[in-house]
């Protein structure tokens, strides 16, 4: 991965963990055996290898000794480990979200591509501030009023990945319901649709939004939302984030990912094309302007 490629401390921790697991498996060592020689128990080692727990320099050195790593590999792994210590913007919001969602934020920040099917709500990466505020306020009753603005700042901070020298590539299929479901007052909804049109005109092709109209009938993703994250490093496989109204989970099962990726590709192809989708969004925007 080039130094100028998008990354994050979360993605770096994941890559470090995978590389360490490869070294352990190359030697045929069990987690228990590594634990006896390094003091890093099986549960901790599993969390490290999955990127969910950070390593100190001293503990990395212990693992490097156990895996008999040469100096150049040790230095390379330490450089990766050092990048896991970078303080990221989402660390300021840890009290608001469960660990799985915080991990999603970190993975999204370091992703290369995101594919998303959104049947009835505009995805967070494309929301306006007012639309996002209306979504947050309409969410679970357990959200405290004082937490609305921090949650809003989180959503808007994520959108920074759509700009810069190496922007996130984003392919979205929007269900027609997402365009017509009134979120906030009519002015909020009109502004949201106007923002979608602006993004399509301004983002230079790295953001594509297609519409799945009601008239299209059944398709592979009918009845479900889907978000797939892909990464630049060949070592990192795709991940799926599946979300309900109150929780979300990251899925790394290969067969599920293969089937979901194929389903998204077919759904993307069945949706209206790029030009027709823009015209559809524009038509709904003008309908709301007249209402």
Image (cartoon, rainbow, N blue to C red):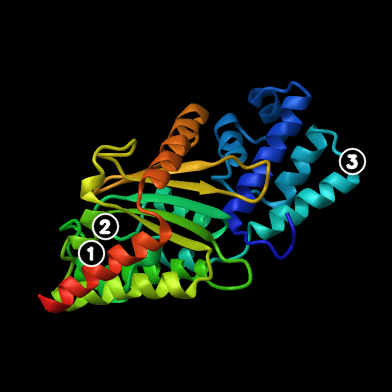
Tell me if I can see residue 291 in this picture: yes
x%, y% of residue 187?
18, 78
Q: Is residue 178 left or right of residue 261?
A: left
Q: Could you tell me if the residues under marks 1 and 3 are in contact, i.e. CB atoms within 8 Å? A: no
Question: Which quadrant of the view contains residue 102?
Answer: bottom left
Mark earlier in primary sequence (1, 2):
2
- Disc 1 versus disc 3: nearer the observer: 1
Q: Could you tell me if the residues under marks 1 and 2 are in contact, i.e. CB atoms within 8 Å? A: yes
Residue beneath label 2, please? 121
Quadrant in which the C terminus is drawn: bottom left
- Above or below, comparing residue 164 to residue 108 in the picture: below
Q: Name the element at disc 3.
A: loop
Residue beneath label 3, please? 70
Farthest left residue? 291
Looking at this view, is 16 or 37 the one in front? 16
Quadrant in which the N terminus is drawn: bottom right
Circle on res. 135: 1
CA gap, disc 1 and disc 3: 52 Å
Q: Is residue 65 left or right of residue 17?
A: right
Mark earlier in primary sequence (1, 3):
3
Q: Local crowd at mark 2 within 10 Å, few (<14), some, or many (≥20)?
A: many
Looking at this view, is 95 or 179 the one in front? 179
């Amino acid at each position: 991965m080039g130094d100028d490629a998008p990354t994050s401390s979360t993605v770096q921790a994941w890559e470090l963990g995978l590389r360490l697991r490869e070294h352990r498996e190359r030697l045929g060592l069990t987690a228990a055996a590594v634990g006896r020689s390094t003091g890093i128990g099986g549960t901790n080692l599993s969390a490290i290898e999955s990127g969910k727990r950070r390593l100190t320099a001293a503990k990395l050195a212990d693992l490097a000794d156990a895996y008999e790593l040469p100096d150049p590999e040790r230095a390379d792994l330490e450089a990766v480990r050092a990048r896991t210590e970078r303080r990221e913007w989402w660390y300021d919001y840890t009290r608001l979200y469960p660990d799985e969602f915080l991990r999603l934020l970190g993975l999204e920040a370091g992703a290369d591509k995101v594919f998303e099917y959104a049947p009835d709500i505009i995805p967070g990466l494309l929301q306006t501030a007012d639309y996002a505020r209306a979504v947050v306020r309409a969410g679970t009753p357990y959200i405290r009023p004082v937490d609305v603005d921090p949650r809003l700042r989180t959503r808007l901070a994520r959108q920074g990945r759509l700009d810069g020298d190496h922007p996130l590539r984003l392919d979205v299929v929007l269900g027609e319901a997402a365009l017509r479901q009134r979120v906030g007052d009519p002015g909020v909804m009109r502004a949201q649709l106007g923002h979608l049109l602006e993004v399509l005109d301004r983002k230079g092709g790295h953001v594509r939004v297609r519409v799945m109209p009601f008239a299209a009938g059944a398709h592979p993703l009918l009845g479900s939302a889907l978000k797939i994250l892909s990464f630049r490093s060949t070592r990192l496989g795709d991940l799926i984030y599946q979300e309900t109204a109150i929780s979300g989970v990251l899925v790394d099962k290969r067969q599920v990912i293969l089937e979901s990726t194929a389903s998204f590709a077919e759904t993307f192809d069945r949706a209206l094309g790029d030009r027709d989708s823009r015209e559809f969004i524009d038509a709904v925007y003008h309908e709301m302007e007249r209402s």
